[in-house]
Every structure is written in C-alpha cells, then in structure tokens.
Image (spheres, rainbow, N blue to C red):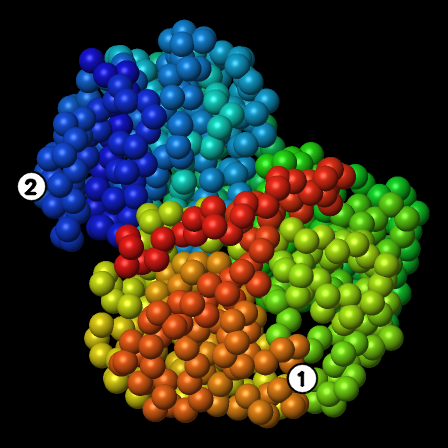
C-alpha cells in the first residue's frame, strides 16, 4: 500500500493537465499512487492521462462513461485509492516541489493524523499572488495536534478539498462523500473537521491554486450557485444525526450563513435578477437551522445576518450600498477634490507624521499607482520571503482597486488609510516616484527601482529637448530625487546615466533588475503554460511587437501594416502586440485582434510573461530590448523614424550603429525590409546572434536570477547586497519555446 493516494478529477483542462501531473509525479517523495479520473472530458485530457499512465505505473487512469461533475469524480477516485492517506488535487492546479516529502516527515514526527492541512498560493493568469488568508492560522498551529472543539478558530481554514491530506480509513469510516453540484467542498470539509480527533497543520505552501482567466465555475454567474443551499442542508442533516456534535452547530451555522452572504454579494456568481430569491433562500435556511440562543456576531457580518434573520431585503440592500460607499472612499471627511477634504487629509497626514516610522511597514507603487508589477512587485515578493516581518501595502488608483490580486494588501490613492500608511511607513519602493506632497522624514527610506535601461534621455537631460521637457517641473523632479536612498541599476551604462539624469546623494545599487529574475527562474513548463494562457498554438513562432512611447504622438499608431506582416509571415507565425502603457486603447488594434490577425496583449499586467512566451522581440527603441536580451533570443529593431526620435527625444548611444554592444540584432528601417528580415532568416542568423551576444555582455552583467535578493538584503535588512553575481557564461536563461 502506498503512503499517499492523490485523486485528480479531470475535465476540460488540457492546457494545465501536464503541469498538474508533472508536479505530482515529479515529487521527491515516491511512495504514492495517482488516480486520474477522466470525467468524460471532451478535449484531449483522456489521451494525456493515458500517455502518463503508460510511462509511469504509479498513475492509474479511470475513464468515466459520462460527465458526473467534480464531486462524484472525486468519489470515484476515492474508490480506487489504496493509500494510508488520500489527497484531492484539482487538475488545473499543481503541487509545489517537496510537498509530499514534507507531509511524510510531519506524519513521521507526530504520528497518525486524521487531517493534515497545508497552505496554498494563488497563481493568476498574469502572475503569482500571495499566500492564503489562513496563512497566519496555519503558522500559529506549529506542530500542535488538536481537535476543532478545542481550537474553534480553525473552522476558518479554506473550505476546499485540495489543501488537506485525509487519513483514508478515517474518511471511509465516517462515510464522507462529495455531493453533486457547486460548493461540494464545504460540507465535507466541515464534516471532517468536526469529527477529526487529530488535526495538524503544515506551514508550507503546497498548492499552486491557478486562477484562470476563463473557465472558472465560481466566476460564471448563473443558477448553479443556488447549489450552495442543498450542500449546507446536507451538512446540517449530518449534524442532526450526530448529537455528540451539538457543540459544533452554532459555529457551522454562522460559517454557512457567512458563506451564503459571501456568494450573494458577488456579481460574478449571483446575477442581479436572482439576488432577491437568493436572499430569501438564505433567510429560509436561517429560519430553519438557527440554533437556540444563537448570538449574532458583531461587525459587518452581524449587520448582514440581522437583515437575513428579519427577512429585510431593503435593509440588506442599504447595507450593501453603504459598504460600497465606504469602499469607494473609506471614512472620507470630504471628497479629496474639495478644499475641505484636502485640508482634512493634510491635517491627518501631518498628525500621523508625528509618530515614529513603523519598521514593519513598507509602501509600494508601480507606474504611478497602477496595478502591482515590474521591479517593485519582484522586490515585494522577495521581501515576503526574506523579511516577512515587513508588511507591504500597495498604492493603487481607485479604478484599478478591484483588479488587485488576492493576497496583496493595498490602499486607494488619497483615501484615509493612504495618508496613514504614507505617514507611518519606514520603507518606500517605486519604479517612478511618489507624489510631491509626500514628505520624507528621518527614519524613512526610499528605493528607486526604475523600469528600464535608458536609451533615451531622462531626467535633467530632457531639458535640452523641448518635446521631452514639456510639462516637466525640473525643480520638483530634483526634490523627488532628494528623497531617494538607493537607486537600482541593471548595468554600468544605466548607473552612469542615472547619476547624470538624476543628480542626488543616493547610493547606486548595481544589483540587476528584480523583475528580470523570472527570466532565469522559469523553466520549460512555465514557458509552455504562459503560451497556452495567451492562446499561442503549439509549433507557432510568436513575435512580440512592443514599440515605445513617442513624445511627438498623442495616440498610438503602428509604424507598419500589422495585418500585412502577419499575412506575409503566414500561419507559422503569430504576432503579439503590446502598446506602451502611456497610450489608451487603439481601435485599429482592437479590430485586428477581433479578426484574429494579431493577439493584443497591451493590457496584460506583466510584460515578463509576454517575453517568456515570445520566440523573438520586434521593437524600436523600447527599453524592453535590454531586458529581453537576458533570454538570449532574437531581437529585431524596426527603426523607421530613428532620425526624428533621436533628435526630438535624445538618445544615449546609437542603437543602429551595427557595432558590437550597440545593436542587439537585425535592423529594418522599412516595412519591406522587416518582412524580408523574417523571410530571409536574418532575424535568427549567425550575424544577429553575434550582435546579441555582445549586447548581452554590455547590458546584462548583473541580471542572473538573484537581483531581488540582493535588493532586499541591502534595502530591508541592511546587509551586503549578496549573493555574488553569476558570470554570464554560467547562467541558464529560460528555454526558448522551440527548445521546449
């Protein structure tokens, strides 16, 4: 009998299934069996399962004759399981390396457990998020073994099947089974937790919980979300049949109603037309199962529960409206645009600045308070690992607040809490600059990460170029520079340019760009997964076209006929187009994308993913060329307006000189030349490779996969900026798509 049985129900996940199976079968702990249940999937999932079963006898393929749904597919897998412990894993998720070995060691240390819970991390289609909301609970548990009756706070652990290892005999003894429909995890999780005599937690991220862009049932509104009522009816029937569990009824009642209210307020689940009925069903459940003497909790949850208890739907709607108002502007004295509001916030900010900076608080911002990204995000993620005592808070624009990934704490710009954290934080991290009204005081530290290698003139050097200088207050610019303590650089060229463009007393940190670590940490599977998410068919050569901003243009217009290039290259190529973030939506590009001529990736949150997915980069004067060079893949420069650009904006060297170290690859100056560059093979020829090697040597001396660590150690921990840089010849960048 194996130690662990991993049951994986499979349905319409062909783009994720290989990653899932590889993450399990590739575990260092080998005493396992895997039961992959093909829930009559209409895609190639069944064939993939059979392929894996043929080469690894630890995997058993089970093919169902009809689709039965997630819960019953799990039950089928359970029937085939023989292990001491059974784990359930969704087929679009994956295990982190070493999870099963860590579970085995914990069980060896503490003896048999009925349930062993571990943590997870959300991975979005644009990148990785943070740990779960239960991370603190799991950490606090340590190596303790307990019953839920003794530690009732652990009822708040995430209600899913896949973050737990169940002792199989315990699971079978109590007859636990997953019911059909949505929310099938909740009742089984609660049943198991209240009956278990020995529960333990493993403070380890064990699952990459993938938040797919499309296809997630919980993000598809419809009547299926009414399944939640039947699921909880099943739970309370279970409790009614077991008087010895009466202690758990009030606790689980509160969690059930909370779950229903949580579902009700989400428009991606319950449609507007169904909300009144859903509220009434929640009220029916409340009336039928409220325990004698039940005390409604305090806070917002209690407010909503009281409306349910009294069947007061108008009161519920009013509470929801009030919550939306608070979210839009938490505790505002007055609108920030009004004079009274500005004075109120100025007073609050000044008052909070009298207190000592909080050494456990850091503020982050990217691209003038857009979504978390770029070097600040890479620093944020590494700081959570190396300096976990420092809590990071992101500043974001109001209109983007709803798109901040789960697990990332944030404040809306100009909200009350914004002024509080700006007054109290010790650490400030930005790739542009914080606003002029932010006052740096003793004890606060500012890290300027920048967001590119400067080909164009920047900062004070823009004064010689009227178009580039338009609207820039250079004295205020210098005032902002005076707040910097550290300036991150990715190469000596940048270090010199920053010190000329932004003269100040800061220290240059030649560490490499943290965002570029990904180019040395991603593997074949990561590249394939990104391409799958972007819709790039296997075997196609993906070209990423990413032009830079023009100071003399107010809107984006492609410098060549995108449709013509796509047609000339044929079906073997696919063109990804990313406009500069300074420009708004392009109707022309939108039309081309809708017709399938190109893939518009302009609003993709992370350019690093796009670079990993691309076989080659086509750009003009964008700093992305310097980052992409880390991947050692072809770069094509399309420079139809070099003379204008270099004169209007100013440049730091001649990108088109053809000299080793200046030019990263093939160059085209007309549309016909660009097409010929690809048709002739010049784009990936020997000459282009030679130029690229010299360009990498000049501009990628520090980017080795450890830049974020060097920055965090120096800025947050006050240590030397180690580890030492890996020589270029000894680095292995992420494999090109063709190599995978």
Give the structural element (helix, strand or loop) at label 1.
loop
Position of 283 relative to 340 (above/below): above
State whether residue 654 appears in this view.
yes
User: What's the residue at 48%, 21% (across, down)?
Assistant: 201
The image quarter in which residue 538 lies:
bottom left
Along the horizontal axis of the image, is 727 left or right of 486? left
- Labels in figure, total: 2
Which quadrant holds residue 544?
A: bottom left
Residue 388 image point, x, y percent = 65, 35
Residue 434 x %, y %: 75, 63
Q: Is residue 546 visible?
A: no
Residue under label 2: 65
Q: Nearer the viewer, residue 697 or 500?
A: 697
Picture quadrant of residue 233: top left
Q: Regarding mark 2 in the picture, which secondary structure is present there?
A: loop
Percent position of residue 126, x then y: 45, 57
Question: Outermost residue toward the left?
Answer: 65
Relative to 508, is 122 on the left or the right?
left
Q: Which mark is residue 650?
A: 1
What is the distance, in whole Å, between disc 1 and disc 2 at their CAs? 67 Å
- Which callout, 1 or 2, points at the residue further toward the start of the chain? 2
Q: Considering depth in this image, is 160 or 544 the residue closer to the camera?
A: 544
Q: Specify whether 601 is left or right of 374.
A: left
Residue sitting at 45 percent across and 9 percent down?
109
* Number of the front mark, 1 or 2: 1
For disc 2, the neighbor class at 10 Å (few under 14, some 14 to 19, many from 20) is few
Across and down, in percent, residue 74 comes to 23, 32
| Quarter the N terminus occupies | top left
- Which residue is pictured at 62% across the width and 87% down the height? 646
The residue located at (33%, 77%) in the rendering is 682
Pointer 1: residues within 10 angstroms few (<14), some, or many (20+)?
A: some
């Amino acid at each position: 009998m194996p130690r662990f049985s991993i049951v994986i129900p499979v349905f319409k996940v062909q783009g994720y299934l290989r990653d899932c199976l590889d993450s399990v079968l590739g575990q260092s702990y080998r005493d396992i069996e895997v039961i992959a249940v093909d829930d009559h999937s209409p895609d190639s999932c069944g064939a993939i399962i059979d392929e894996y079963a043929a080469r690894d006898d630890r995997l058993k393929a089970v093919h169902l004759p009809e689709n039965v749904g997630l819960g019953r597919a799990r039950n089928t897998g359970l029937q085939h399981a023989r292990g001491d412990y059974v784990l359930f894993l969704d087929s679009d998720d994956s295990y982190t390396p070493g999870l099963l070995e860590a579970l085995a060691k914990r069980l060896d240390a503490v003896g048999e457990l009925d349930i062993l819970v571990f943590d997870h991390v959300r991975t979005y289609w644009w990148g990785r998020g943070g740990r779960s909301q239960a991370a603190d609970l799991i950490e606090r548990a340590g190596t303790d073994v307990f019953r839920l009756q003794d530690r009732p706070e652990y009822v708040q652990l995430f209600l899913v099947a896949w973050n737990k290892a169940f002792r199989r005999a315990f699971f079978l003894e109590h007859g636990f089974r997953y019911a059909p429909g949505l929310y099938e995890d909740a009742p089984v999780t609660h049943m198991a937790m209240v009956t278990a005599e020995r529960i333990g937690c493993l403070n380890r991220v064990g699952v990459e919980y993938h938040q797919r862009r499309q296809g997630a049932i919980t993000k598809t509104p419809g009547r299926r979300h009414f399944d939640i009522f039947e699921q909880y009816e099943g739970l309370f029937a279970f409790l009614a049949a077991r008087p010895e569990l009466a202690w758990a009824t009030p606790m689980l009642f509160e969690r059930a109603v909370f779950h229903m209210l949580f579902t009700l307020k989400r428009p991606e689940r319950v449609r507007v037309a169904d909300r009144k009925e859903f509220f009434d069903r929640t009220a029916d459940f409340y009336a039928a199962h409220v325990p004698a003497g039940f005390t409604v909790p305090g806070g917002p949850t209690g407010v909503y529960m009281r409306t349910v208890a009294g069947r007061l739907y108008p009161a519920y709607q009013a509470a929801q409206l009030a919550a939306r108002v608070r979210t839009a502007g938490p505790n505002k004295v007055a609108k920030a645009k009004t004079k009274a509001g500005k004075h109120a916030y100025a007073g609050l900010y000044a008052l909070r600045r009298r207190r000592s900076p909080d050494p456990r608080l850091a503020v982050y911002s990217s691209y003038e308070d857009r979504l978390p990204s770029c070097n600040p995000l890479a620093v944020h993620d590494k700081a959570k690992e190396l300096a976990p005592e420092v809590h990071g808070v992101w500043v974001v624009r109001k209109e983007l607040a709803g798109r901040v990934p789960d697990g990332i704490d944030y404040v809306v710009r100009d909200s009350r809490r914004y002024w509080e954290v700006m007054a109290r934080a010790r650490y400030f991290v930005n790739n542009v600059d914080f606003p002029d009204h932010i006052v740096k005081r003793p004890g606060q530290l500012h890290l300027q990460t920048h967001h590119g290698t400067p080909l164009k003139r920047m900062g004070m050097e823009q004064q010689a170029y009227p178009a580039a200088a338009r609207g820039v207050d250079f004295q205020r610019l210098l005032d902002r520079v005076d707040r910097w303590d550290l300036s991150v650089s990715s190469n000596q060229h940048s270090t010199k340019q920053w010190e000329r463009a932004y003269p100040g007393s800061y220290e240059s940190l030649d560490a490499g760009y943290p965002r570029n670590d990904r180019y040395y940490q991603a593997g074949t599977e990561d590249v394939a997964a990104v391409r799958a998410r972007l819709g790039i068919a296997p075997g196609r050569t993906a070209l990423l076209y990413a032009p830079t901003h023009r100071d003399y243009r107010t809107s984006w217009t492609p410098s060549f006929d995108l449709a013509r290039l796509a047609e000339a290259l044929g079906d073997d190529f696919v063109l990804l187009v990313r406009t500069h973030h300074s420009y708004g939506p392009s109707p022309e590009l939108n039309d081309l994308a809708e017709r399938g001529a190109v893939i518009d990736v302009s609003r993709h949150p992370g350019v690093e993913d796009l670079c990993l997915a691309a076989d080659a980069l086509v750009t003009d004067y964008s700093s992305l060329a310097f980052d992409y060079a880390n991947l050692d893949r072809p770069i094509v420069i399309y420079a139809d307006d070099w003379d204008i650009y270099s004169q209007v904006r100013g440049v730091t060297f001649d990108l088109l000189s053809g000299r080793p170290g200046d030019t990263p690859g093939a160059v085209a100056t007309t549309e016909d030349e660009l097409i010929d560059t690809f048709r002739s093979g010049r784009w990936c020829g020997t000459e282009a490779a030679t130029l690229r090697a010299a360009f990498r040597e000049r501009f990628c001396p520090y980017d080795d996969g450890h830049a974020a660590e060097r920055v965090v150690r120096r800025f947050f921990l006050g240590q030397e900026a180690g580890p030492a840089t890996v020589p270029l010849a000894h680095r292995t960048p992420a494999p090109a798509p063709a190599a995978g």
